[in-house]
Each structure stands twice: as C-alpha cells, then as structure tokens.
Image (cartoon, rainbow, N blue to C red):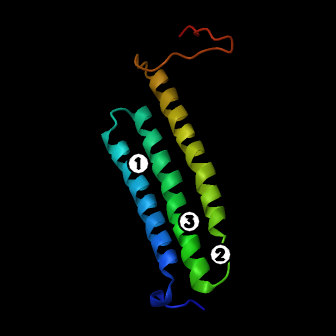
Amino acid sequence: MMQPISDFPLWAAIAVAVFLLLGAILTLIGTIGFLRLPSFYERLHAPTLGTSWGVGGTMVASMIFFTVGTERYVIHEILIGVFVTVTTPITFMLLARAALHRDRAEGDQQVPHKMDLGGTRDAD
C-alpha cells in the first residue's frame, strides 16, 4: 500500500524533485539540439543524449518515489533504463546509415565517400 504524499520524508521528496528536474532539463537540451542543429547527421546526436540521460533521471526519481512510498525496493525500472539505453543509440545508428546510403545513392557531394577495408576511397 502506498503511503500518502504528505507523509513522504523530506530527503525523498528533494531527491525525487532533483532527479525529475535533471531528467527534464536533459530531455529539453536534447530537444533544443534537435531543433537547432542544421543537418540531419548533426541532429542525430542531441536526441540520444535527451532520451538516454533524460530517461535515466526520471527513472531514478521513480525508483526513489516508489521505494519510499511502498516501503519495499522497486528496481524494475532498471530494465526500462537498460532497454532505452541500448536501443536508442542502435536506432539512431541505423537511421544514420540509411540516410547515408540514400544520400550516396542520390549523389550528394557533401556526404563522405565510401571507404574500403584498406582505408582507401572506392571509385564511384
């Protein structure tokens, strides 16, 4: 059974507030970076920061809140954090590779040329 919010210890309320603010600020930074950076490839980095670290702050706040509120350890949020931390960079890497393939196929000159395993440029 959850205890009422009014019965929460001060240290727990401060810790939850700090981690929620930290997660929200990092997510906001990622969002601003996504909106402000000029190219698609540069935009991929900022949301990774926002989702990985932003979710991390929110997850820690949730763990503290429900651990103190139910008086038992609540750690299943770690699985959510691991899932987000692993899948977000992989998803953005696949998006970057797809965009790079598309840009090379269209003949965009601003995209780096494909390299072979020896480190030399392939002839297009």
Secondary structure state at the residue bearing disc 1: helix
Viewer-nearest residue: 80 or 114: 80
User: What residue is shown at x 64% (from left), y 14% (from top)?
Assistant: 116
Q: CA distance from mark 3 to mark 1?
A: 19 Å
Front disc: 3 or 1: 3
Q: Which residue is mark 3?
A: 60
Q: Residue 30 has which mark?
A: 1
Q: Residues within 10 Å of mark 2 (few under 14, many from 20)?
A: some
| 34 over 4 or under it: above or below | above
Residue at x 43% of width, y 43% of height: 46
Amino acid type indicated by mark 1: Gly
Task: Label 2, secondary structure: give it.
Answer: loop
Which residue bears the numbered disc 2? Answer: 74
Question: At 56% across and 65% down in the image, what residue appears?
Answer: 60
Identity of the amino acid at label 3?
Val
Residues at circles 1 and 2 in contact by the CB criterion of under 8 Å: no
